[in-house]
Image (cartoon, grey):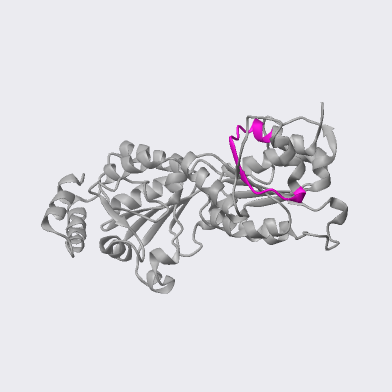
Amino acid sequence: MQLTGAEIVIRCLQEENVEHVFGYPGGSVLYIYDEFFKQDKLKHVLVRHEQAAVHAADAYSRSSNKVGVCMVTSGPGVTNAVTGIATAYMDSIPLVILTGQVPTHYIGEDAFQECDTVGITRPCVKHNFLVKDVRDLAVTIKKAFYLAKTGRPGPVLVDIPKDITMHKCEYQYPKTIEMRSYNPIVKGHPGQIKKAVQMLLDAKRPLIYAGGGVILSNSSARLLKLAHLLGFPVTNTLMGLGGYPSTDGQFLGMLGMHGTYEANMAMQTADVILAVGARFDDRVIGNQVHFASVPRKIIHVDIDPSSISKRVKVEVPIVGDVGEVLEELCKQLLASGGKAEPKALAAWWKEIDAWRSKNRSSTSRAKKSSCRNT
């Protein structure tokens, strides 16, 4: 069955079970918009600005745990969208951005509303594609969704020239996709996990530092299980809020310049830090040089190997899906039967409670102490 490129775009989105597309029309994507009105499975949400389209798709993804999808036109449509794309990239939000482009024979000719979309967005996307043949369109969109939601999630952009949306070809959407150059590691290395368990059990002033990776991997329950097995204090980044119950007595609150005193003091004085899906940004650790000057050991769990040891030295790197690694840590802890040294842990909690007592009422302190599970 032969379909136009515009029809293929709509069919591909339907194959991916997309329900909402956030967008703003423009000349280069008009043929795709024509196809929107010939079907009723996809709902288009009209925004007032291309930046809003990406932000809306971003918010949709965060709240639905699905890949957000948006569509904008060429030139100023794309450049208006860059702020939203960069936001999604920094926060590891899975998006597929469909952008219009001038016809292929005009690319590089300074045509009306032409810009180098691939070049402009390269620094703030997980990957981007320029489709130059309608026969590559379906497989490219399949790759875009696969890349966006696997490994460390992120925005993936597909740039579609206007003539590609008019050309016809046989339509076939691949059921699965394999990319030889892209194979994210899911399982953590058993030897590294074993080292991490021993380091945690030997710790005198431990801290669990959880980031947005806990949310993205749906690993809140596993994090809670691990924290209760160890009896360690837990802190979150802004992106990690909601990944650990704020009512739990082991929760110290959020880190950083807008965080709690006890969370920041614990971060700066801990001797062993278990970082889970977090990236040690400047709002969390402050001055990188000063943070590194205090002797401490760091275990860093992240699916993105480039995030590990990027800002701070890490003793035990564990590359893998946060949920898988947390599950394995719990298994090895239970199998070993080991426990953290109780006197040292009690002294650590006493110091943390002293920090908590600053600017807090006695009622609040009593409530926190009563619900802590150590």
Return the residue nearer the eye: 95 or 10.
10
Highlighted magenta segment, given as a residue range: 12-28
User: Looking at the image, which is closer to me, 331 or 186?
Assistant: 186
Q: How many marks?
A: 0
Residue 26 against residue 284 in the figure, above or below: above
**Vertical placement of residue 158 versus 279, above or below:** above
Closest to the observer: 318 or 60? 60
Tell me where residue 223 appears, x and y as whole percent. Answer: 36, 43
Residue 168 shown in magenta: no
Image coordinates for residue 241, horizontal then vertical, percent? 37, 51
Name the residue: 81% across, 38% down. 135
Q: Is residue 132 visible?
A: no
Q: Position of residue 152 (x, y in %)?
A: 54, 48
The quarter holding residue 31 reads top right
Give yes or no for residue 24 being in the magenta stretch: yes
65 relative to 72 in the view: left or right: left
Report x, y in % for residue 320. Answer: 50, 45
Of the 4 image quadrants, the one containing the N terminus is top right
The residue at the far right in this view is 105
Residue 257 seen in the figure = yes
Q: Is residue 193 above or below residue 35?
A: below
- Judged left or right of residue 340, residue 93 is right
Q: Image quadrant of residue 137?
A: top right
User: Height in image: 232 above or below 21?
Assistant: below
What residue sits 63% from the left and 47% below the top? Answer: 23
